[in-house]
Image (tube, rainbow, N blue to C red):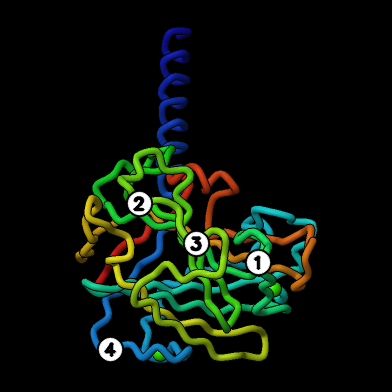
Amino acid sequence: MRRLSVLSMFLALVQVFGLAVSAQASDTPTAYAYEVKSPIAIDGDLSEWNLSSPIVINDISQVIRDAARWEGPDVTSCIVYVMWDKDNLYLGVDVTEGTRFDVSGGLPMDQVDNFMVYISTDPTLDPNRTSYDTRDFLLYLITDNYWWDTAFDRSMVEKRERFSSAGLEGGEDVLQGYEKAVQITGKGFVYEAVIPWANFSNNRIPVYTPKVGDTIKFDFVLTDSPMACPGTEYVPQLAWTGDSRINQNPSLWGNLVFAE
Ligand SMILES: [Ca+2]
Ligand SMILES: [Ca+2]
């Protein structure tokens, strides 16, 4: 009897662990990027977009910095949409911000109003990797509605293949062919942009050409400075998934699936 009960306990444990493992795997948030079938007009109006896979960033559990200063989803939150074609990545973001377009010169890029796009361009990589691969990128998109500075942070990438950090001092647009537009809304703004895939490449890193069914690691951060004021101390950041370790560890990012 005793042996039997030990065995049944063991089996129960196996079952519990099995469930825990599968729950953990399915816990990784997944969004779909839909293929662009007819041309997208970059005008800050997302009416021609497939909006069926929103990346919603609006919860206290998603605040990865200065949570005590986050004033809630009605002041700082966003919904992100991703689309693609063989040449371009498209981003649409419906932003709620009490203080939009707050960017003052001289502050670090991650202390001013921005989007931070965490994206891999190699679907064959191990999704559980805990450090940045050559083809994992952190792209800053400053949202000032004027200069629209952009930057790449590659400081965490060991094998950079001569693709180094660029634009982190501010005042630069390091992207080629980046088009963006916004429409002001009552609660913030709607942002629409196209970024050619060629920006995530150089003569050592191939250009990514997505195909239907590809899954890449992806994350998105919204930084909302409460006021354009040098010395601003608390600047909340919200991420789709993960915590501040996403800056070092792609396994904490979500999954982005390329769909038709
Ligand atoms: Ca449009
Ligand atoms: Ca702001």
Residue at image coords 34%, 69%: 33
User: Where does residue 74 sit, x and y in percent of width and height?
Assistant: 71, 76
In this rendering, the label closer to the viewer, 1 or 2: 2
Q: Residues within 10 Å of mark 2 (few under 14, many from 20)?
A: many
Between the C-alphas of marks 3 and 1, the distance is 14 Å
Q: In the picture shown, does residue 176 fall above or below 217?
A: below
CB atoms of marks 1 and 2 within 8 Å: no
User: Where does residue 182 sit, x and y in percent of width and height?
Assistant: 52, 87
- Residue 198: image quadrant is bottom left
Q: Along the polypeptide, which appears first: circle 4 or circle 3?
A: 4
- Badge 3 marks a residue whose secondary structure is loop
Q: Along the polypeptide, which appears first: circle 1 or circle 2?
A: 1
Residue at image coords 48%, 53%: 153
Which amino acid, mark 3?
Gly
Question: What residue is pinned by disc 2?
Answer: 163
User: Where does residue 149 sit, x and y in percent of width and height?
Assistant: 52, 71
Question: What residue is pinned by disc 3?
Answer: 167
CB atoms of marks 4 and 3 within 8 Å: no
Between the C-alphas of marks 2 and 3, the distance is 12 Å
Q: Which mark is residue 112?
A: 1
Question: What residue is pinned by disc 4?
Answer: 39
Q: Disc 1 beta carbon < 8 A from ligand 2?
A: no
Between the C-alphas of marks 4 and 1, the distance is 32 Å
Which amino acid, mark 4?
Pro
Between the C-alphas of marks 4 and 2, the distance is 31 Å
Between the C-alphas of marks 1 and 2, the distance is 24 Å
